[in-house]
Amino acid sequence: MTHAGRMAVTGCSLRTPLGDDAATVLRRLLAGERAAAPNAHFDASTYACRLAATIPSAPRPTKHRKFVKRMGLFGMEVGAEALARSGAPAKGARLGLFCGYGGLRAHWDDLMPVLERQTGDERATGAWGQGFSLLHPFWMLFHLSNNAHALLSIDLGAKGDGTTTAGSNAGAQALQAAIVALATDRVDAALVFAYDSLVEPETLLSLGTSGAATAAATPAAIVAPYDERAAGIVPGEAAAAVVLERPEDAGERAISFVSAAATADGAVDFPSPRALASLASALSADDTIVDGAALASPTRDAAERAALAGVLGPSATLLALTASTGHLGGATAVVQAILLAEALRAGALPPIAGLDRPAVGPLRPLVRAEETRARSALGLSAGMPGLAGAVRVEVP
Amino acid sequence: MKRQVFVRGRGAITPLGETWPASRDALAEGRSAVEPVKHFDVEGYPSQVAATVPFALDARGLRSDKPSYAPKPPLDEAEDRRLALARRAADEAWAEARVSAAPSRIGVFVGAESGRATYGTIFALSRAAGGGARFDHARFGEDARRLATSVHAAAVSPAAVASALAARIGAEGPVETISLACASGAAAIVSATQAIRLGLCDVALAGGVGADVDPFMLVGFGLLGALSARGVSCPFDVRRDGFVVGEGAAFVVLAADAGDAPRAEIRGAARTLDAHHLTAPDPTGDGAERAMRGAIEDAGHVKIGYVQAHGTSTQLNDAVEAAAIRRVLGDALPDAHVGAVKGAVGHWIAGAGAIGFLCALEAVEEGLCLPTAGLDAPDPACALPHVAGAALRKPVEAALVNAFAFGGANASLVVSRCA
């Protein structure tokens, strides 16, 4: 596995459960805060997974609400903000736009009234007269996978190369696609935005029932990833965006540098540690800090640590930003690109929030915040089915 | 100097055939698979036809025999039609390619949309949520647990197809899922081409799959006014009034190594964005034209003898595309021919660009230009040297492939015959 190169980040923006600017989020990460709380979106008291890490704010009012749901709107917001902050001169056909999103959700508010009077037989007999005819003509547009991508391209006049990549490692895929576009000189700047929420009824149902997500009743009862008693992730949500440019074009505007890679191994659930290690191997250049996939399962965590030790050495420092933010699905890699750079610039590494009893094994799970002089770090992400992503971050 | 990208294998399962050769032969006869939907009740729907794959499918697509770190969900893979279709087409392409490379040098690039739980599953979930007009979370949290596997990521994630195919062919290189609506399949082939050129991989499985002949999609596209009320797919015809949903999968195997007897290579690839409208194409055709010109410029000196048009059979899209093709080919237009496949197999959405690519490949490899089924009365606004009625045989040095999507995403490719 190889990667497409290293590009400069010249602008960024994000929405996370811990805040809407990187400095604030880093401060809370360093304090060991956790965003997990009783689900703020709906009453999940009967779900197998009752806790979640949600973005406390709402998207700004916009005409796009007719076509795009909440997380897509967040994605569009951070995309526009990142581009405005970047100072990138590229416009029109030289400006690329790359989106990563987790996948479509059912939008039950629209569907329940439509299904209420239906009989539900295999052939959907009479479904039109019993409800489908009530759907809004624009209902389909909420289910257009590239709706946020399309509308943001219009808002920004981005007419160059662009894709919407998808899945729980979509952020890493989008970063990689953007880097390829820059490396092949198809665009002069590439705006990458990613968004995802695991705090949806079906997702919580699946993650909770399978045991992948925490069954803790209270935030205090959550056990951190890499703890010997770890017992599941906290579903979270985020939107994040970065503007990438070739280093020689970015010059002094470069605030960090990234490379990225994504793969998949066909596993029904999380990818094998080997897949994560292969990405780390492809991107790493003697890095000693890694933000792990942090799946919060003693067996998985141990296997991940063993595999990464083979690439980074047994004493590499292990972080778990998602112990604080919750698992961010397809947004993870772009969030990592922003927050790891913020931490490296500040010279401070955040602890794994709530880590009391680190499991024995290679790598050094960080229990307390500590200073660092390192200028680079790796971020890994893992999602179902068998999806792995990685980003390497470097600061000037 | 760019690395060359050779086409080593191809495969498809379509409403007209279980393999690419079978499909090609049916397409060459000008046949259409569009017919009234029979497997669910479409009474009242704005459009009541589709092109459905009629062949039996073994749907198991995801690996489940590797060590696991948690109990595996008893996944009902039989419900995911995307995987079933994609696996058949990918297997065919992979078998034909006979390529060898280290696993880390093999990539997978797939155009696919999110998997949709079946109508029955969605209905059952709604009942678990109380069955009323509002979603009852308290009931859902308890009653829906028995349905959890039906909404597992392996069934609904857009990336499930690419992940499954990567495992199937032993790919451990870059794996990418593109959900770019109707341009997904072609955009995935563009990504694969770039990945090989850049050296990210040496071999790539690339293509797309569409499996959207279900009640929700027919209703959604129908209410939007995108589907043919007449129930006919006839790209560029004066009577066209919308597209017809189809399903199928098409894949190619690309490689930096030409193999023993190279027949075709991808010479040009480009993607653009209209930045114009969520559903309508830019009436000036600017984005489409830039995609085509970008691919041709990328290809260098080639003579385009055939154009595989996107050809949705919608009023505006076909007229805009036809005008853009005329501008791009200019004086070379009379020497070229134009075909579109959606009249025969419907619109596969995420898979559309991939089956179009196979049609173009046929033109350059075999000199077989497939006809546009349903095109009986060409619209003067879509004046082009169409291939209509029956297939046309002629030597084609290079072919241009278009795929244009809702949201204004455009992808074009140039594939040429190897000397």
Image (cartoon, helix red, strand yellow):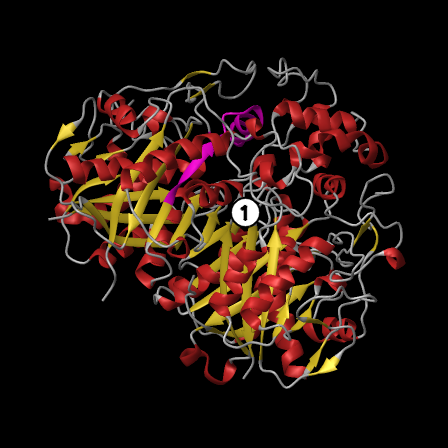
Percent across and percent down for residue A175 are 50, 62
Q: Which of the 4 image quarters holds residue A171?
A: bottom right
Q: Is residue A81 above or below residue A371?
A: above
- The reply to whether the magenta stretch includes residue A116 is no
Percent across and percent down for residue B277 are 48, 47
Along the line of sight, the residue nearer the viewer: A124 or A293: A293
Q: Is residue B185 left or right of residue A297?
A: left
Along the line of sight, the residue nearer the viewer: B203 or A79: B203
Percent across and percent down for residue A121 are 66, 15
Along the line of sight, the residue nearer the viewer: A291 or B37: A291
- The reply to whether the magenta stretch includes residue B224 is yes
Q: Which residues are magenta?
A: B206-226
**The N terminus of chain B is located in which quarter?**
bottom left
The kind of residue on which mark 1 rests is: Asn
Q: Mark 1, chain letter?
A: A
Percent across and percent down for residue B13 are 37, 28
Give the labeled residue for mark 1.
A147
Q: Secondary structure at mark 1?
A: helix
Does any portion of residue B348 appear in the rendered image? no
Q: Is residue A99 above or below residue B304?
A: below
Q: Is residue A96 left or right of residue B414?
A: right
Q: Residue at x 75, y 58 (%)?
A: A55
